Amino acid sequence: MNELNLPHYHISVRPLVEYVFRSGSIDSRFQAPTSLSEGTRAHQKIQKTYNEGDQKEVPLKLSIEHGGFLFELEGRCDGLLFGEKGNIIIDEIKSTAAGIEGILIDSYPVHLAQAKCYAYMFSMDKGIKEISIQLTYVDSKTDDLKRFHQTFSFQQLESFIKEILEDFLPFARMLSEHKNLCRQSIKDLVFPFKTYRKGQKKLAASVYDAIKGKKELFLRAPTGIGKTISTIFPSVKAVGEEEIDHLFYLTAKTITRQTAEESFQLLEKEGLHFKTVTLTAKDKVCLNDTTSCQKDMCPFADGYYDRINGAILDIYKNKNNITRGTIEEYSKKHRVCPFEFSLDLAYIADAVICDYNYIFDPRISLKRFSEEYKKRSLLLIDEAHNLVDRARGMFSGSLMKSPFLNIKRSYKGKNQRIFESAKNINQYFIDLKKEADNRKEWILSEFPDNLFKLAAEFNSRTEEELASGSTDTELLDAYFMTLAFVKTAALFDDHYAIMIQADRKEATIKLFCLDPSLLLSKMGKNYHSKVYFSATFTPMNYFKEMLGANNEAMEVSIDSPFASSQTEVFIYPISTRYKGREKSYNPIAKTINDLITVRPGNYLVFFPSYQYLMETFEAFKEIDAMTETIIQSRGMAESEREAFLASFQEENKNSLVGFAVLGGVFSEGVDLKGERLNGVVCVGVGLPQVGLERNIIKDYYRAQGSNGFDYSYVYPGMNKVLQAAGRLIRSEDDYGTIVLMDDRFLENKYQKLLPQEWKDFRII
Ligand code: SF4
């Protein structure tokens, strides 16, 4: 509030004019993008031509009263120019790679409005009666320019600004009213359970401390303690105390996203008013059979921007938890694309529940968040042990030979430039394969500069073809593949390796990110605070290093709230090593049979591979054809997965043995409470399959002075074992049996990685 007692509303010019002036349809037909660096270069080139005394990148601020608010506008104009007759000109520069020939002064009302707002802000500040604007469009490929000029009186600009604010008023009112309601509701909010579980208070307090101290927190908290609510509750409280304004709940899996949604719903029942939006991948949430985002193909794309403001006002006024189902319902009601709708909502929500990639993947991350917004936002990163390999994938990029061979063939005589370009890349791979020397996989010791240039050239030539209206999907896919490769190449440094895979038909070159820590910390930079949490941060230092922890990062471990008497742990010391593995099928099958004979119930048995699973399953059926079994198969559909889990019922009269794969869909995030699961058997120590990728990671960390084998194989493997066995005890009323089948579990290295409550194991 100010001396007039008006509520403040702080907004940048760009989102304000976008809200008011955006219109038309979503059109995802190919448009040549202007990269950030190209845009900046084009801007700077123009700014260098300014006369002496002209200014560039001029920050502007203005407080203006309207409709019961004190609006605080801010922005930055590209140029402040002084004309020959002393007239003042605000220059607004826009770069495009799509050509400038057809652009008129009113082609982009948002650009014109932006320039007029800056002109008003400057005139108001300096008491100027008349001012000009200049809209400068630059073709980022050719540097051709097109300029438009207009002159306005102060009164004209003032009326214009008032009209904009009037249009924006309902939105400002809605957000302001929500903010008041939200803050008020948080004041009285209490933890939504009568009591805290053992350790839960410490967990919540450590999250709160991390937010207060603007710190990174690495939190190891056991499965079943209630991590989701214990991280969300203190974060919401911190919003109420104005420590932060927003939070992101980042997860790797749909099931954990639902748990986060349920936690917010629980708090809503306690009186919380909080706007939470869940983001779902475009192909999943799309309302059409084929995702073709053009107005002629999709009614939800057609006129999207004409209807989106109404849709936002409607959903925001009526819903707090905006889940996938709610998005779909309101998308149909207002005929707007659910994916774009959810993104638009994310920018105004109190909390966003989404996959890691919306924050950490440089190709997908949400770009409209300002640095100021990030400084007021918290990242809660759930099951963060998954982020290590996910990040390796996000920061890596590949090129395959076969698309270039196909394009070479199909563009011969049709487009010589694309034909030549594809031919050159195809030839590069042919030459590469000649170096194979009977190898199927190997690493290149030097960065392939030549290929990088060829890929960039192909990308640029393809861009011209696609921008001219080509609908060749193979060309489009190859364009995006080379674009991702060129972008990854820009990140390439000594955290990367260059891998080649080749066989008779195909060859692939991959810029493989071995160590994601640096890029993760860059992508997560500037957020107010970050909480990484997992039940299996074991060993903690390994995960801190992998996830790019800074020197001041806090570290907290919470003991299990459950009694060790709830779990009986057995180790069956048998070799499950690849060599001689066939000798283990029968003994393992026999031991499973003994287990269910002595302790009937529902069991999950995890294997390191499908083949191992099937061989042991066959052996088990030989011994025991009567016991009910269910098998995880490759690529199970959602409904098949649900059916698999639904077969684990408390009421099952006979034993059930589920055969599943370690590290697969059933070994993490699955919640089978009480008698639905009586025991878990883990066959092997979970080591990833030996291969080139894992071996280069091993060598990389060995060269850094760490135990490369542990970093590459042991820790990721044991993580899978701990996650799978963690499915067993989910509450104070759960009891059950864990059987670890491998002689290596008795070795010191593996013993150190077992949770304290398993240390009273017995050897079978
Ligand atoms: S509904 Fe589907 S096809 Fe239509 S714009 Fe959205 S994502 Fe694209």
Image (cartoon, rainbow, N blue to C red):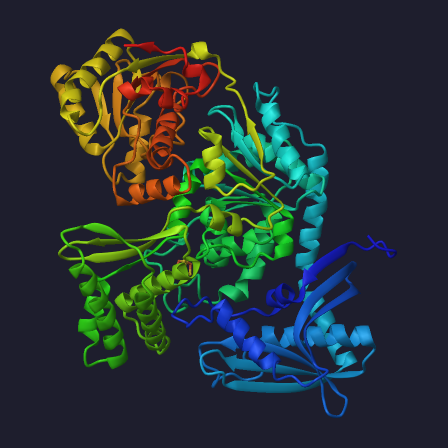
Placement of 39 over or under 85, stated as above or below: above
Residue at image point 62% right, 20% down: 194
Question: Where residue 394 sits: x, y (%)?
Answer: 40, 51
Taking depth in this image into account, of 331 and 209 the one nearest to the observer is: 209
Residue placed farthest to the left in the image? 622
Residue at image point 72% right, 45% down: 180
Taking depth in this image into account, of 93 and 165 the one nearest to the observer is: 93
Judge left or right: residue 378 versus residue 399. right
Residue placed farthest to the right in the image? 3
Residue 713 seen in the figure: yes
Taking depth in this image into account, of 241 and 291 the one nearest to the observer is: 241
Looking at the image, how many numbered discs can be counted on the residues? 0
Question: Where residue 268 sits: x, y (%)?
Answer: 60, 35
Placement of 410 over or under 507, stated as above or below: below
Instruction: Locate ligand 1 by image quadrant.
Output: bottom left
Question: Where residue 405 sits: x, y (%)?
Answer: 19, 67
Question: Where residue 94 sits: x, y (%)?
Answer: 56, 76
Residue at image point 31% right, 15% down: 571
Residue 415 seen in the figure: no
Placement of 651 over or under 374, stated as above or below: above
Taking depth in this image into account, of 339 and 680 the one nearest to the observer is: 680
**Quarter of the rendering containing residue 700:** top left
Residue at image point 41% right, 66% down: 28
Dividing the image into 4 quarters, which one contains the C terminus? top left
Residue placed farthest to the bottom in the image? 85
